[in-house]
Image: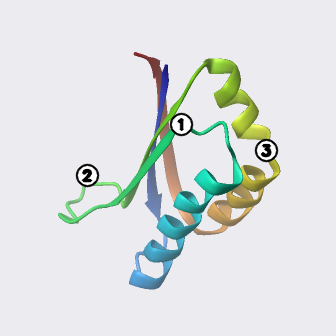
């Protein structure tokens, strides 16, 4: 099993933008069958070091995660997130 975690810091921290990012990320589960599970959280502390949104997802293998990254639904989300993101960090690990 592979875990894929992504932290998003957004330029626009409005409720509308945060909700759209969360909704669009969660929608990937229905569009990309390779995703085994997905959770999305919105930060509640708003500390200087905090990120705004986190994606926590699981895949059966590294190959499945790589296929997810080039899936048209993920590419479309990537095009959108690039317009609203300030910074993105990710970590992928086997468990």
**Percent from the top left, x then y, of residue 64?**
68, 26
Mark 2 closeness class: few <14, some 14–19, many ≥20 residues within 10 Å:
few
Task: Determine which of the numbered discs, if any, sits on residue 49 in the image.
Answer: 2
Could you give the CA–CA distance between mark 2 and mark 1, rounded to whole angstroms?
30 Å
Which corner quadrant holds the C terminus? top left
Is 63 placed above or below 8 here? above
Q: Say whether disc 1 or disc 3 marks the residue closer to the N-terminus.
A: 1
Write down the quadrant of residue 42 in the picture. bottom left
Q: Earlier in the sequence, mark 2 or mark 1?
A: 1
Residue that label 1 marks: 36
| Residues at marks 2 and 1 touching, judged by CB atoms closer than 8 Å | no
Mark 3, secondary structure of its residue:
loop
Q: Nearer the viewer, mark 2 or mark 1?
A: 1
Asked if residue 24 is positioned above or below residue 78 in the image, the reply reads below
Residue 85, how many percent across, how many down? 55, 61
Measured Cα–Cα span from mark 1 to mark 3: 15 Å
Q: Secondary structure at mark 2?
A: loop
**Disc 2 and disc 3 in contact, CB within 8 angstroms:** no
Decide if residue 44 is on the left or right side of residue 95. left
**CA distance for labels 2 and 3:** 31 Å
Residue identifier under label 3:
71
Q: What secondary structure is found at the residue carrying circle 1?
A: loop
Q: Nearer the viewer, residue 89 or 31?
A: 31
């Amino acid at each position: 099993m592979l875990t894929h975690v992504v932290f998003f810091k957004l330029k626009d921290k409005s409720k509308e933008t945060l909700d759209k990012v969360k909704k669009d990320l969660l929608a990937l589960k229905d569009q990309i069958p390779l995703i085994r599970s997905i959770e999305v959280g919105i930060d509640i502390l708003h500390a200087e070091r905090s990120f705004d949104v986190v994606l926590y997802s699981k895949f059966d293998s590294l190959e499945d995660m790589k296929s997810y990254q080039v899936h048209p639904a993920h590419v479309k989300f990537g095009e959108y997130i690039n317009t609203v993101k300030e910074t993105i960090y990710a970590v992928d690990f086997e468990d």
